[in-house]
Image (cartoon, coloured by chain):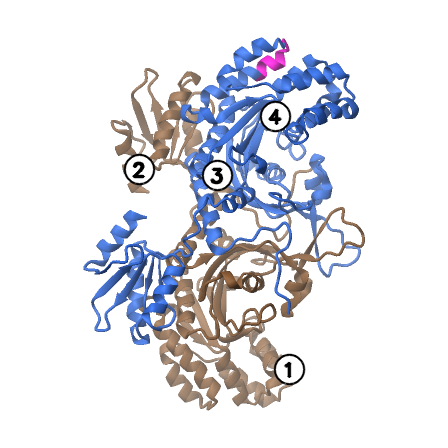
Chain colours: A brown, B blue
Amino acid sequence: MAKPRPISGFLELLPEQKLAEDRLISAIREVYELHGFLPIETPAVELVSTLASKGVVDREIYVVKRLHADEEEEADLGLHFDLTVPFARYVAQHFSKLHLPFKRYQLQKVWRGERPQKGRFREFYQFDIDIIAREDLPIACDAEIINMLLKAFEVIKAGSFSMLLNSRKVLYGAYEACGVAAEAMKATIIAVDKLSKIGAEGVGKELIEGVGLLPDVADRILNISSAKCSLGELEAWGFRSGVGSALFQEGLRELESIGRLIRPELRSHCMFDMSLARGLDYYTGVVFEVKLTEHPEFGTVASGGRYDDLASQFINQKLPGVGGSIGLTRLIDLLLSKGKVETNKRSTADALISVLSEEQRSECNQVAEVLRSLGIGCDVYYKSPKLGKQIDYAAQLGMRYVLFLSPEGGKIEVKDLQTKQQSVVEDLAKWCASVKSQK
Amino acid sequence: MAKPRPISGFLELLPEQKLAEDRLISAIREVYELHGFLPIETPAVELVSTLASKGVVDREIYVVKRLHADEEEEADLGLHFDLTVPFARYVAQHFSKLHLPFKRYQLQKVWRGERPQKGRFREFYQFDIDIIAREDLPIACDAEIINMLLKAFEVIKAGSFSMLLNSRKVLYGAYEACGVAAEAMKATIIAVDKLSKIGAEGVGKELIEGVGLLPDVADRILNISSAKCSLGELEAWGFRSGVGSALFQEGLRELESIGRLIRPELRSHCMFDMSLARGLDYYTGVVFEVKLTEHPEFGTVASGGRYDDLASQFINQKLPGVGGSIGLTRLIDLLLSKGKVETNKRSTADALISVLSEEQRSECNQVAEVLRSLGIGCDVYYKSPKLGKQIDYAAQLGMRYVLFLSPEGGKIEVKDLQTKQQSVVEDLAKWCASVKSQK
């Protein structure tokens, strides 16, 4: 008999931590639902052929197979590694039954067979939102996704945060003007995306030795990549940059339009950053990522962007979309490690109904049902030991109130463990209402 | 490019169906939280050695392995096939940080590599509740779990339902009195558990040929297995049965105690049924299952029971517990197929803010934010085509209201798609309050 140990890369929370995660989830979900986004959920598995269809690095995929499968039985199912591929497959599969524009949210775990490290998990929650439409999707949708993510980070109170934005059009246009050929574009983007990790020198080296750019082209790229400004200053920066490319100008105009549609009170979180490229290759317009200002070492906690074509590998429809994803597990792990979420409440109940004797239990249960019907969670102590023991239990679990029923029946008293006051409950309904109003 | 098809045994819902499932989940969760139960969540995977430790039929386990794992890399992780084994492992692993009695709920998907059939899935949600304590757990806890499950079935409005109850003690005691030897007890229980599937004749054959009982012993078992009565009639039935076994009497007394603690308004759903045995071998006291009265063909939608020892394979502690599990996926599949859940609402928004021109969009967004801050979900139309098209979108998604902002600004009108009335909104806050109160 060996005491079980955690499996590396799989986060498991204590109940009070899970309560905190659930509050985080509820807060984000409320933002999404207030915007009319619809929930979907896909199976944990997809066909391996579906997962591999976007040219992803497939060594990260976990395949699943019956333990006692026959030798020749092929493992054709794999756990999804993100929610974008399943979403694309879902849209294609159910296309005739969906209403466009389709605005969905999706909260599920994803799995990657990567080497675990600080802040990187093998199993983690992603909380995605996307809008897709047929043929064309206005820039207002990019702004809506961005507003929703910003709002989500406001309501979860994770401390100060910033969203860096850029556009693939601005990047392509600028790189082209720097002298990068079309066929070297993706490799250039992937190299520049490493700026925050390996620095300018490292990226410069990779641009020259890896991508094969000329040293002065690499220099120009590194130079323009250091540009940062608010979205309101973009026009002036674009003019100063001297880049004439039409694509570059179009990208800037789109970013400015998005900037104007970001709600004024959220704009200060946003910053254009020319070094932001995002490694994934399906983005075609705006790209963005969110970092917690006080904890840059934890990296990106949300990201997303615009893509021209969601599901062409599955369906003969052009479906442009824009979406974003919050890395929820990384976020809760960070917030827990920094003590930024409350974990004192270790119960879903506000009150404990103490039980003085087993004869009293049915009456206690009745009182508990009255409280519950009025929306107050309560626990009835499972045995009937000395009162002190029952009060300790309530205190340990962070319940605020302990109720006592007089043995003669009828009278209820309550002890408030916060104020240490004890008083008679004259009117149970009124008392419940006052507890509820204080929550 | 082939249109993706569903993977057999993996249920995938349309958004409006997922909304219905989420309502079901919320309703059940609310019941559990009002009783002070705490959420936990375990990884989707456990060590295969953990999963196989209870002597389960391990051919149902799905193992996971990296797609590009080396040949010799052993698949040591498997997807959990229920939430009981992970719960036992969780309790053992975090024992020093948990407060006993520990009351937890757990809603997660589980996976079984079984052949899919009607109502049986390879991936499905289980919604579990359990109470565990150290050394001894009073019968009041059995009653609490049963009350909670009955309450859950009441609030989800799945139609009429019944809970069949029995006790392993009653079963063992009665079978012993019928002449079954201790070593044949488990096999006898497993055989009797098939009564509803293969009938008395089939079970009789299995008891004689499979278990090796004498024909008259098998007859006595079949005879006593037909007993059914309310929990209040148990004492009388026990007396009539003539079984003298102390264990049998103890089991009956426990069932009667549970019966007295079941809330009066829920008692009519409960029925003692001597044919109920439950196949799983770790139960030691009360066992129960819930069926929808109108749809017996769908089988059991919830079940559970009392066990003496949760986690002895992981920890040197005697931890008795009692728990129950709702088969949520089977339930929602059934309710959807019978049209018993509402799926007309295809949006989380109540209102659409129509957009007459792109110049108006920022103002529309502002109005939307006011509505959201007052708790009314709303969607701002993504483009600005003719009004008819926007109203169609709202109607298709089941939103009740469409708001129009006058081009001159200031004035807001609302069309109620249900009553077809159109009116001026004089006070937005008041209007939101009235919408909220009607929800």
Give the chain letter at badge 1: A
Number of other residues with Cα within 10 Å of mark 2, as a class: few under 14, some 14 to 19, many 20 or more: some
In which quadrant of the rendered view does residue A206 lie?
A: bottom right
Looking at the rendered structure, which numbered label has been put on residue A435? 2
The reply to whether the C-beta atoms of the residues labelled 1 and 2 are less than 8 Å apart is no
Q: Identity of the amino acid at label 1?
A: Val
In which quadrant of the rendered view does residue B281 lie?
A: top right
Q: CA distance from mark 4 to mark 1?
A: 70 Å
Please state, as top left, top right, bottom left or bottom right, where the N terminus of chain B lies in the image.
bottom right
Position of residue B277 measured from the top left corner of the image (x, y, whole percent) = 63, 26
Q: Which residues are magenta?
A: B244-251
Q: Secondary structure at mark 2?
A: helix
Q: Identity of the amino acid at label 4?
A: Leu
Q: Secondary structure at mark 3?
A: strand
Q: Secondary structure at mark 4?
A: loop
Position of residue B115 measured from the top left corner of the image (x, y, whole percent) = 69, 46
**What residue appears at the point 70 percent right and 43 percent down from the top-left corner?**
B60
Looking at the rendered structure, which numbered label has been put on residue A211? 1
Name the residue tied to disc 3: B38
Name the residue tied to disc 4: B276
Give the chain letter at badge 2: A
Q: Identity of the amino acid at label 2?
A: Val
Q: CA distance from mark 3 to mark 4?
A: 30 Å
Label 3 or label 1, whichever lies nearer to me, is: 3
Position of residue B110 measured from the top left corner of the image (x, y, whole percent) = 61, 45
Q: Nearer the viewer, residue A421 or B232?
A: B232
Q: Are marks 3 and 4 on the same chain?
A: yes
Q: Main secondary structure of the magenta part?
A: helix
| B248 magenta-colored | yes
